[in-house]
Image: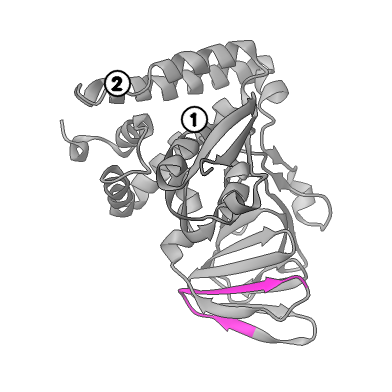
C-alpha cells in the first residue's frame, strides 16, 4: 500500500514512526506531504499533539508505562517493510488517546499533564488574567466566539476581551497564529509588547521573545501601531520585528519557514546554536544547555522535529563539532568535540 492510499491520519502515524525526518530524503518527502493538503497538516498536528503528551506523563505511573510501551513499538529496522512501523505508530497513538480518555474520568490528567487552561465564557468579555494557557510541549487550537481560530504555541498565554463591540486580545507571552474571521465593522486587535496589531480578516503570526516581538503576515493585511512612531502596514510575505521600545523594521520573510512550528517542526537557517536551543527548549520538559560561548556561537541550518531532545542532539552532532552529554534525567549539555 502506498502512502497515497492512506488516510491523512494513517499517513501522519507513519511519519510519526520515522526517526529521521530531519535527514534527506525523508525531510523533503515529509515537507511535500505536508504541502499536499490542509487535511495532512491537521492530521500531523493532531498526531504530534497526542505524542507530545508523553513529555508531561512521567508523574503518572500508568501513563508513563503505556508511553514506554508505545515507544518500544516504534520504528522497525530500515530493512523491514514500512507497514509494521505504521501499525506500531497507529497503535501508539491509539493507546495514548485511550489512556487519556480513561484517565480524564479518573483525574489522572489534571494531576500529571498540566492541561491547557481554558477560562469560563464570561471572562472572555474582560481584560484580566489569561483565558488560554499552554505549558511546555503543549499546543492548542482555539475557536473564539467570533469565528476566529487561534493556534497557541507551547508555553504561551492569551487574554481575550470581546466587549463593547471590540475584538481585543493580548498575547502575554509566547507565540500564536491568528486566522481572523472577517468583520469590517469590528477590527481584530492583538496587543503584544506595547504594540497593537490590527486586522479585519487575515492570517498572521505574533511571537514574543525576551525584549522583542515579531509579526509575520501570511494573508491579507495588518497594521502595527505603537505610541510615538508611525503606523506600519504589512503585505503578505512581510515581517515586522522590533526590540522593546525601539522603532522596529519591516523585512521580507519565508512564510513557510516562519509557520513551520504549527506542524511540529522548526527550521533554522544559519542561526546561532544558542537561538535554536532556546526555541527547542519551549517544546519539552527536558532542556538543553550550552555553557561554552564558542559552541553557542556555532551556526546551524536544518529542519528539526520539536519535542525530541535526543534526536536533535544526534542530528546536530553530525553537522557540527559538538556532542550532547546527559547531565541528569532532564538536562543535556552540548559540548565541543574540538581539542
Residue 108: tell me if it is visible.
yes
Determine the CA span between mark 2 and mark 1: 18 Å
Residue hosting label 2: 76
Establish if 245 lies above or below 258.
below
Dot 1: what SS?
helix
Q: Is residue 76 left or right of residue 22?
A: left
Q: Is residue 61 above or below residue 71?
A: above
Quick one: SS at disc 2? loop
User: How far across and how far down the image is residue 123, in percent?
Assistant: 79, 50
Q: Quadrant of residue 6?
A: top left
- The single residue placed furthest to the right in the displayed view is 128
Which numbered disc covers residue 51? 1
Q: Is residue 234 magenta?
A: yes
Q: Residue furthest left?
A: 1
- The quarter of the rendered structure image containing the C terminus is top right
Residue 255: % across, % down: 45, 65
In this rendered view, identify the residue nearer to me: 83 or 19.
Answer: 19
Amino acid at each position: 500500500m502506498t502512502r497515497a492510499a492512506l488516510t491523512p491520519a494513517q499517513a501522519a502515524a507513519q511519519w510519526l514512526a520515522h526517526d529521521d525526518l530531519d535527514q534527506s530524503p525523508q525531510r523533503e518527502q515529509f515537507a511535500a506531504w505536508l504541502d499536499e493538503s490542509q487535511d495532512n497538516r491537521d492530521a500531523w498536528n493532531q498526531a504530534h499533539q497526542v505524542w507530545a503528551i508523553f513529555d508531561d506523563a512521567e508523574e503518572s505511573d500508568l501513563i508513563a508505562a503505556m508511553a514506554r510501551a508505545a515507544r518500544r513499538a516504534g520504528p522497525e529496522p530500515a530493512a523491514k517493510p514500512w507497514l509494521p512501523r505504521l501499525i506500531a505508530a497507529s497503535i501508539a497513538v491509539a493507546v495514548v488517546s485511550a489512556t487519556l480518555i480513561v484517565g480524564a474520568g479518573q483525574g489522572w490528567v489534571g494531576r500529571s499533564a498540566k492541561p491547557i487552561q481554558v477560562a469560563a465564557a464570561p471572562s472572555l468579555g474582560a481584560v484580566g488574567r489569561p483565558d488560554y494557557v499552554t505549558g511546555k510541549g503543549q499546543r492548542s487550537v482555539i475557536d473564539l466566539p467570533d469565528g476566529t481560530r487561534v493556534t497557541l504555541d507551547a508555553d504561551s498565554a492569551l487574554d481575550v476581551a470581546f466587549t463593547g463591540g471590540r475584538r481585543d486580545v493580548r498575547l502575554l507571552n509566547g507565540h500564536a497564529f491568528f486566522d481572523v474571521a472577517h468583520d469590517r465593522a469590528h477590527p481584530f486587535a492583538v496587543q503584544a509588547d506595547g504594540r497593537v496589531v490590527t486586522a479585519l480578516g487575515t492570517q498572521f503570526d505574533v511571537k514574543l521573545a525576551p525584549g522583542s516581538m515579531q509579526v509575520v503576515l501570511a494573508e491579507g493585511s495588518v497594521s502595527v501601531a505603537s505610541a510615538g512612531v508611525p503606523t506600519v502596514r504589512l503585505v503578505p510575505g512581510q515581517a515586522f520585528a522590533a526590540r522593546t521600545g525601539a522603532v522596529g523594521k519591516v523585512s521580507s520573510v519565508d512564510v513557510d519557514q516562519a509557520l513551520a512550528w504549527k506542524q511540529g517542526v522548526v527550521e533554522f537557517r544559519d542561526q546561532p546554536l544558542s537561538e535554536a536551543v532556546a526555541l527547542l527548549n519551549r517544546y519539552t520538559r527536558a532542556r538543553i544547555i550550552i555553557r561554552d560561548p564558542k559552541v553557542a556561537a556555532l551556526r546551524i541550518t536544518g529542519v528539526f522535529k520539536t519535542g525530541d531532545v535526543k534526536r536533535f542532539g544526534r542530528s546536530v552532532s553530525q553537522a557540527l563539532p559538538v556532542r550532547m552529554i546527559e547531565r541528569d534525567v532532564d538536562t543535556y549539555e552540548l559540548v565541543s568535540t574540538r581539542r
